[in-house]
Image (cartoon, rainbow, N blue to C red):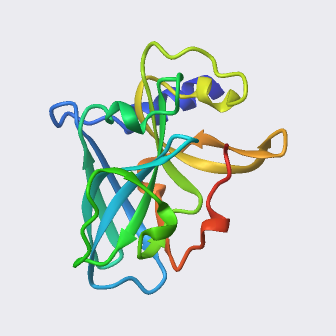
Amino acid sequence: MRPLLLIALAACTSTANGGKFNVDGNISGSAPPTGKVVFVWDTRSQQYKWGEGTSTAGNFTVTLDPSPPKDAFIAMTGDAVGIPVLIDNSQTIADGPVTLGSVARLGIATDYAVIYKTSTVEDVPDLPWVKTFGASYSCAMCVRGGNGGKDSWQLTPCANVQIVVGGADASVCNWK
């Protein structure tokens, strides 16, 4: 029964928007009336900003192209982990390498991410959670200490993705 549930959730994450992927989530805490949400992709060796959307009245929407740029992938895996970050409407962050600590952010998703997996990805021994995701985009929720003491990811509906206003770096899922 459990595999059927995972398949049903995976189907909820796809869109018919020209292969693009929509993430519609919410913001907890005192969110500004409007803002920007950017995705910071963690490659283990660097962080890469790619993908941007808007927030209004405690909700956000980001539409991602069919595949992240290759520099957003975890080296040699075909996988990518994107964390949504709330920034001020007046702020602009160019796509490319970025240091998350240098981003003046209002909030961050501490327990949620978007996972991208190529259809040809092989099993990643130190990231066993990777094999539980299907090809393309999926939304994920952090499982604290679920990977031999390290955090891991599990599939979740995209409507669950939440940015926490004032969320700290130390609170972000430590899956690496």
The vertical placement of 101 against 76, above or below, is below
Identify the residue shown where x is 52% and y is 33%: 74
* Percent coordinates x, y for residue 148 in the rendering: 84, 39
* Percent coordinates x, y for residue 104 in the rendering: 41, 76
The vertical placement of 161 against 44, above or below, is below
Q: Nearer the viewer, residue 23 or 1?
A: 23
Identify the residue shown where x is 46% and y is 69%: 102
Which quadrant: the C terminus? top right
Identify the residue shown where x is 61% and y is 40%: 154
- Rendering quarter of residue 136: top left
* Percent coordinates x, y for residue 96 in the rendering: 32, 48
Q: Nearer the viewer, residue 36 or 70?
A: 70
From the viewer's perspective, tell me whether residue 165 is left or right of residue 64: right
The vertical placement of 134 against 60, above or below, is above
From the viewer's perspective, tell me whether residue 162 is left or right of residue 128: left
From the viewer's perspective, tell me whether residue 59 is left or right of residue 43: left
